[in-house]
Image (spheres, rainbow, N blue to C red):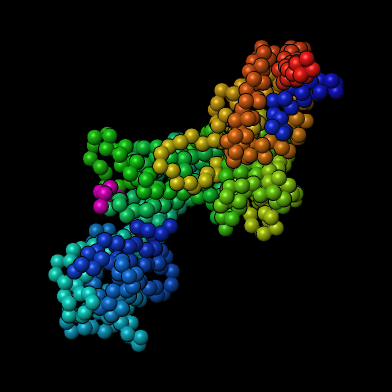
Amino acid sequence: MSIKKIFIFSIIFCLLFPASSVYGHGLGIDTISSINIQEKQFSVSIEMPMYFENEQEQITITATDNETDENVNNVTYLIGIFYKDEMILRNYFFAEDGILPITVTPTNDGDITIVGEKDSLLGAWYGTESNPVEITGPIFNSGGLYTFEIEIRTIDEPTNIIEDSGVYTADLTIVESKSFTQKDQNNQDVEFGTKSYFDSISNFQYDSDKKEVTFEMPFDWNESKMSHVNVIHVETQFPKDFEEFLSPSYTGHVNDIKLFKSSVTVDDYTYDDERTVHFVLLQDHLRYLKNEMRELEQPLPDKIEFKLSASEETKFPLIAYTASEEFKVNLAWDPKDIEVGVPTNFVFTIRDSYTDSPMRLSDYTFVIVQNNKELHRVSDNAEVGGDFEKFTFSEGQTGPTIVKFENIRNTGQETEFAFVVFDKTFGEKKSAAVEQVVDEPVASPQESSEEDGGCLIATATYGSEMSQQVQQLRELRDNQLLNTESGTAFMGMFNDVYYSFSPVIADYERENPYFKEAVKIAITPMISTLSIMESAETESEVLGLGLSVIALNLGMYIGLPAFGIVKVIQLRKN
């Protein structure tokens, strides 16, 4: 291909992309904050481990005066504990300083017994340094939601007995992990796992035809319960080499209502061999779902039915955090469909996860792994926070693939993305990618501003990869340029230059709305002129119409301003 042809295409694209232009209800602790007895306002908090992993664990119940923030003295609690709507314990407990520590020794059988001291007034259990209160027996030996019903029977003085103080409830969870064996499309066993930070999961099913997972758990949609549910968090896990369900992205539903994008996140770095998909429902999400169910004019259910569906559409940027959540990595690639034998540009930005700002001068090691074997490893420095790496998958390098970012900023921290590469020659789906989604609380559904691997600046400018302008650029690239020999050769050279600066321009557009508007003003006329090339099919047509576009843009961006400057100078002279 001649230097002249490369120069023509370079002018077109340089004009187009200018370089310078858990804690709360159900989780660990729950607080009853509205107790009013004898003109005293106080709160009662219950703390319980989320995991009963040791032989003994401790539950702590504390009463605190809301005005003084000091403990309430001489409190007698009547405590009932319920699991799956069955009472497993009900008894009196006394705390001289308002703090009641209870040692729990779970067993799988036998009776529940209480050891400690007992007072003579109400027969309430209390502990001393030498003889603390201890509960032993088949209690807290299963995961799920435990409900504490608490009544206050004395405060301030041991003999100040309170009648009809009211019954207050708190809910706490022991994290429950379960395994489920399901069948894939070839009738082979696949091990799925779930982890619930709220209540027990049941009726787990994987549909290999629909490529979706469904399961459910009990839930009370009454406002009295929902008002102190801060978050519901459940996970499902499956092997990373389970190609059938290793999707570019996932959509989540609750009771057949589509969830916000932020409610479904993918985690490929917590476990080496498993992918975890998180459902995270905040209180605002739950209220939104409840309102949607009410509009159906049907009785509210007594459960949450989860559905996780695989999607075929890859949305950029993919996002992953390091284990410490100190760093965040955005990743996109071009071409969007990864194919054997076709060079792929992996474009990424290393960010501060708290400020979301690109981190300049970031050292990193970029690694591609397939079948536990390294295909590529390179260490470099992202001087402006964004960078790109190029790699071509060769014949036989297909299947589940992992891209790792190791030793980010020389801290030893890392994160990774997973995707599947297919060989196009076998007529299979070209590629499937993993979507890593930021877990950001939102109050209503919203469009995400994903970057496309080939139009980073335009996507940031117009707010969506589905915008008309971005689609026009893609069609020009795919239908005109990449269908000609000179255009294909040019794109390879152009990508090397474009991806060296485009992530930074796109990042700055998102951070600075004024800069974004300036870029939009600059490139919108240019994009409009590209419609001239839509009919170009052959080498000569692409070159001829390309020259026309160049001439038109030179006239708009150089000729007209130059003419205006000359006129101003002439007017000043006159």
Identify which residue is drawn at 33% across, 50% down.
217
Where does the magenta region start and end? 219-224
Frontmost residue, 52 versus 331: 331
Relative to 531, say whether 384 is above or below: below
- Using the image, determine if residue 386 lies above or below residue 44: above
Is residue 493 in sight in this rendering?
yes
Q: Nearer the viewer, residue 507 or 320?
A: 507
Residue 222 within the segment the image draws in magenta: yes
Residue depicted at x 41% and y 74% = 55
Q: Residue furthest left?
A: 163
Query: Residue 317's quadrant in the figure?
Result: top right
Whether residue 431 is visible = no
- What x and y, as percent, mark residue 245? 51, 41
Q: Is residue 170 magenta?
A: no
Horizontal arrangement in the rendering, residue 519 relative to residue 51 (left or right): right
Q: Residue 303, image x and y in percent?
A: 30, 47
